[in-house]
């Protein structure tokens, strides 16, 4: 009985520091969460204010009345039917192509032992080390000579080219968690290479593909530099480039701009919420494997 009492007391004392440390971590994380969410709430708050309230009231004060007219102006000034469609088209097609290319490339690199495939992997790793902003001039020169500027397929091609290095790195790292025995069993059953990949390997890559889709969709949807460099025609511009036009040296319509930012964030927020489960698994499975 005494031994049981000592054991219980020891467990209580050992759990005490853990509880305190957990409480401190929770406080720190709560403060960080507030700091991250505050700018988002301020933007949403400003999107419902008048111009007068924007300059005369506190960022945290609520608007006297909800100014939905800011969203109507955002639709008109941004030509949202065109810019939103362009952005959605560029992002969707680029992400789908990246997911297919990076998955098959990573599978070949992970399963083939030849030196050529090792060289390809190093080549893609080197591509991550070079920021694509530093390659804008040669990218534009190549695109101009190949008549890819001011074309939809041209900017999609450039998004794929600048994102494939990270995608291959991510998918190759995850490929080590896929059991090779499943592929061997599929080959014994008579599956071709393509059928083995699309029916056996690809379903197991959902977490990695979800991670790739979310991260590349974030980058492409919010991209301004490449879109502004490659596209000058009004009917091909993206949402981010159109939003920038609301901020000028002469006049700046901040309330309309805030409404436009809220509109532009919604699709990506919905995408993240839909793929959140796979995204978290894709980011942590490598660490758990180790």
Image (spheres, rainbow, N blue to C red):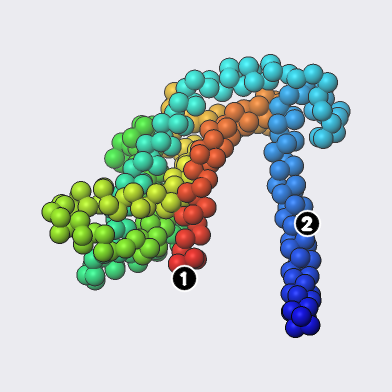
160 left or right, relative to 36: left
Disc 1 from disc 2: Cα separation = 30 Å
Marks 2 and 1: in contact by CB < 8 Å?
A: no
- Tell me the quadrant of the picture where the N terminus can be found: bottom right
For residue 227, above or below residue 289: above
One can see residue 248 in this view: no
In front: 17, or 30? Answer: 17
Q: Residue at x 67, y 24 (%)?
A: 256
Q: Residues within 10 Å of mark 1 (few under 14, many from 20)?
A: few
Q: Secondary structure at mark 1?
A: loop
Q: Position of residue 56 (x, y in %)?
A: 86, 28
Q: Which residue bears the numbered disc 2?
A: 27
Q: Would you identify the image quadrant in which residue 97 lies?
A: top left
> Residue 290, which numbered label?
1
Q: Earlier in the sequence, mark 1 or mark 2?
A: 2
Q: Residue at x 77, y 24 (%)?
A: 49
Q: Secondary structure at mark 2?
A: helix
Q: Position of residue 106 (x, y in %)?
A: 32, 58
> Residue 60, which numbered label?
none
């Amino acid at each position: 009985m005494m031994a049981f009492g000592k054991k219980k007391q020891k467990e209580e004392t050992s759990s005490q520091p853990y509880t305190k440390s957990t409480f401190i971590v929770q406080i720190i994380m709560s403060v960080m969460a507030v700091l991250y969410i505050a700018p988002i709430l301020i933007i949403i708050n400003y999107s419902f204010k008048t111009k007068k309230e924007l300059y005369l009231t506190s960022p945290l004060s609520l608007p006297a009345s909800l100014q939905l007219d800011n969203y109507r102006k955002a639709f008109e000034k941004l030509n949202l039917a065109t810019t939103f469609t362009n952005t959605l088209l560029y992002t969707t097609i680029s992400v789908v192509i990246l997911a297919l290319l990076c998955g098959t490339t990573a599978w070949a690199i992970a399963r083939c032992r030849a030196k050529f495939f090792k060289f390809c992997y190093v080549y893609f790793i080197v591509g991550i080390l070079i920021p694509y902003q530093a390659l804008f001039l040669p990218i534009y020169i190549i695109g101009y000579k190949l008549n890819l500027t001011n074309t939809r397929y041209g900017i999609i091609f450039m998004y794929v080219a600048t994102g494939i290095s990270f995608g291959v790195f991510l998918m190759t790292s995850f490929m080590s968690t896929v059991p090779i025995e499943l592929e061997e069993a599929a080959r014994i059953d008579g599956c071709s290479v393509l059928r083995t990949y699309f029916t056996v390997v690809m379903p197991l890559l959902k977490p990695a593909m979800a991670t790739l889709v979310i991260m590349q969709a974030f980058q492409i949807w919010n991209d301004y530099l490449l879109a502004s460099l490659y596209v000058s025609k009004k009917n091909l511009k993206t949402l981010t480039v159109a939003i920038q036009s609301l901020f000028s040296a002469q006049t700046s319509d901040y309330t309309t701009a805030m409404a436009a930012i809220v509109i532009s964030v919604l699709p990506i927020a919905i995408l993240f919420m839909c793929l959140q489960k796979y995204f978290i698994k894709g980011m942590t499975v490598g660490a758990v494997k180790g």
